[in-house]
Amino acid sequence: MIAEAVHEIRGRSDVQPAVGVVLGSGLGAFAEELADHVAIPYVEIPGWPGSTAVGHAGKLILGRLSNLPVAVMAGRAHLYEGYTPAQVTYGVRVLGALGVRSMVFTNAAGGINLALERGGLALISDHIN
């Protein structure tokens, strides 16, 4: 199924992404900043699970950021939506098959540290599973 997804994506864009970005809630506008971008709804990519979370557009966007070819996942599937681990990781595995070797994951998160401000940037180095 991954091969079919790669075939569909390559048929719509000649961008060979080096970096993949997974956007969390509220960051959808980032993808619109890409030069020469092409947006492909997940429902049009074979095997790609849809995203039902609020604020997740459900699109793969390919383009260039400062001349760097990137693939941006605007939304993703979650286990709490009833998807399997294989389905949740499908997009990242497809990006790997497209040639992506570096990934940036973002998300909306809450915290209890009063020094953190709304809209601030935080690096998460560990979490409670």
Image (tube, helix red, strand yellow):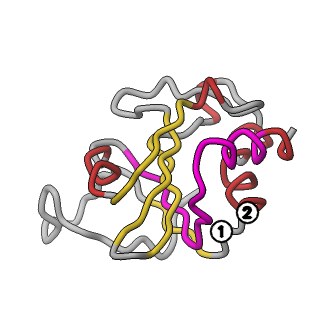
Q: Residue at x 25, y 69 (%)?
A: 121
- Tag shown at residue 34: none
Q: Position of residue 40 (x, y in %)?
A: 53, 36
Residue at 59% x, 73% y is 18
Task: Give the secondary structure at mark 1.
Answer: loop
Magenta segment range? 5-24
- Amino acid type assigned to the residue bearing label 2 in the image: Gly
Reply yes or no: does residue 103 show up in magenta: no
The circle drawn on residue 100 is 1
Quarter where residue 47 is shown: top right
State which quadrant residue 12 falls in: top right
Whether label 2 touches label 1, CB < 8 Å = yes
Neighbor class of circle 2 (other Cα within 10 Å; few <14, some 14-19, many 20+) is: some
Viewer-proximal residue among 35 and 89: 35
Measured in 3D between alpha carbons, the distance from the residue under mark 2 to the one under mark 1, in whole angstroms, is 5 Å
* Residue placed under numbered mark 2 in the picture: 96
Q: Position of residue 30 (x, y in %)?
A: 29, 54
Which class describes the residues within 10 Å of circle 1: few (<14), some (14-19), or many (20+)?
Answer: many
